[in-house]
Amino acid sequence: MAELKEARVPDIGDYDGVPVIEVLVAVGDTVAKDQGLVTLESDKATMEVPAPFGGVVKELRIKVGDSVKEGSVVAIIESGDAAEAAPKVPAKTEAPAAATPTAQPTPAADDSTVEPVAVAAKPDNIAQASIDAQAGNTTQSAPMGAGLPPVRFDAEALLPGKVPYASPAVRLFARELGVDLAHVTGSARGGRISKEDVQGFVKGVIAGGGVGNGAAAGGLNIIAWPKVDFAKFGEVESKPLSRIKKLTGANLHRNWVSIPHVTNHEDADITELEALRLQLNKEAEGKSGKGTGTKVTMLAFLVKACVAALQKFPNFNASLDGDSLILKKYFHIGFAADTPNGLMVPVIRDADRKGVFEIAKEMGELAGLAREGKLKPDQIQGGCFSISSLGGIGGTYFTPIINAPEVAILGVCRSSTRPVWDGKQFMPRLILPLSLSWDHRVIDGAEAARFNAYLAQVLADFRRVLL
Ligand code: CAO
């Protein structure tokens, strides 16, 4: 039997008088249990108030601009068998996950359309956390709704460098104007996008004739994307991009067009290192008795070698912050992991303090979590430098795209035995192809060549890591 019930703001911690910045449903909408009803914004986080039960929204008791606290009535929902059984519809307003860094609870009603990635769900009902993903900084996790089911985070929204850096209010403002924040350059501290930046962007677009359509301020004078009816030429199938792919794509595009990339290639002689790796693995296997010991990978050695190079060339362990360079004293190394949902970049923290076995073990675990979509926010944040290894697959060299706000990335391809002239004769040596992409605003060509040469030296003689 149908019953009118109040949907109230659940426990939102110590917040009082939190403004409503968005109403996600309208009277008459059928909502699913846990579907977002409204978005609240505290000074540090945005949170969605989920429907405590499914049903038809009969009355909305709040509007944008109102302030609420725990217990405030948000809506009157007719719940009951009929209402619960009614076809569920997504929230009227487009969920802001793709456009904002706010980790969205995945609406239960929309599971079929939402990639089941990510996760970092805390068992005790963390409803939503606003993540300053680019800054690698979780600003707030607001507990909401004790007793509500655990809520999933969208990992892609948490990827470092995956979303523009702006407050929820600025995101809302941008959404109202139809501005894609991926196109806006932030002028505030740490590259944060302010309301003025959005206004300036809009003015620039108006003055310049549109994004991608003219010389908008700071924009690219590129022609429109070709519109082709592919079906005219043969059978085709249209497959939507996954959300990770869409977000990764937007960020890669931004990084590609906004960072002056240069890629230097280098060959490292890893003959001895590979012999050591095989020897270590043999010993580890012997110790475990059953061959179940951690296998040390070439990638783990590469992480250590990169740390040595970053220590020697600190400009590579840095991020641009307006006119300043932030030099990091820590060594958190990201590595690209290929997952069914798309590219993820888990981070090995404090790699300078870890041994190769520990790094290899952690990498294996992080890559496993990435593939299962179970990485937590702190496992994908704070990276200083990334490694993208295609060594297990093949190839010789490639040009990796820098994972902003980092300033360099190392691409690694498959090692192969090549004849190398030692001054008297050709010797068979195992050569690892390296490709270092670097940001020319921060690094000069000579410095990059030195970095690569040093990296190759370390890999050729790993004792140099100690120097
Ligand atoms: N040269 C030769 N062989 C290599 C190698 C190299 N540079 N790197 C790895 N291999 C070998 C390994 O030794 C392993 O061989 P065995 O099975 O005989 O032990 C095999 O290749 C498979 O390695 P792997 O890829 O499973 O393991 P890894 O530690 O090298 O990499 C991970 C782990 C997570 C980085 C990898 O699985 C992966 O996802 N790579 C893709 C990264 C990617 O997509 N980059 C592109 C980003 S830009 O779009």
Image (cartoon, helix red, strand yellow):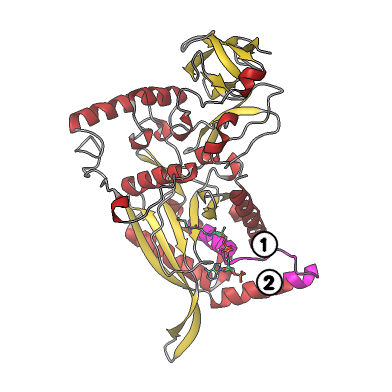
Q: Which of 269/400 is in front?
A: 400
Q: Is mark 2 within 8 Å of ligand 1?
A: no
At x 43%, y 43%, the residue is 246
Asked where in the image residue 284 lies, by quadrant, the reply is: bottom right
Spot occupied by residue 266 in the image (x, y as percentages of width and height): 41, 69
Does residue 228 lie above or below 450 as drawn? above
Residue 7 seen in render: yes
- First to last magenta residue range: 284-310
Q: Quadrant of ligand 1?
A: bottom right
Spot occupied by residue 240 in the image (x, y as percentages of width and height): 44, 44
Spot occupied by residue 5 in the image (x, y as percentages of width and height): 65, 10
Q: Is residue 208 magenta?
A: no
- Label of residue 280 in the image: 2
Crowding around mark 2 (Cα neighbors within 10 Å: few <14, some 14 to 19, many 20+) is some
Spot occupied by residue 293 in the image (x, y as percentages of width and height): 74, 65
Asked where in the image residue 199 lies, by quadrant, the reply is: top left
In the picture of the structure, the residue carrying the numbered disc 1 is 357
User: CA gap, disc 1 to disc 2?
Assistant: 9 Å
Q: Taking 46 as reference, is 80 left or right?
A: right
Q: Name the outermost residue toward the right.
A: 289
Does residue 127 lie above or below 248 as drawn? above
At x 54%, y 54%, the residue is 337
Asked if labels 2 and 1 touch by Cβ distance under 8 angstroms, the answer is yes
Asked where in the image residue 12 lies, by quadrant, the reply is: top right
Q: Which of 226/261 is in front?
A: 226
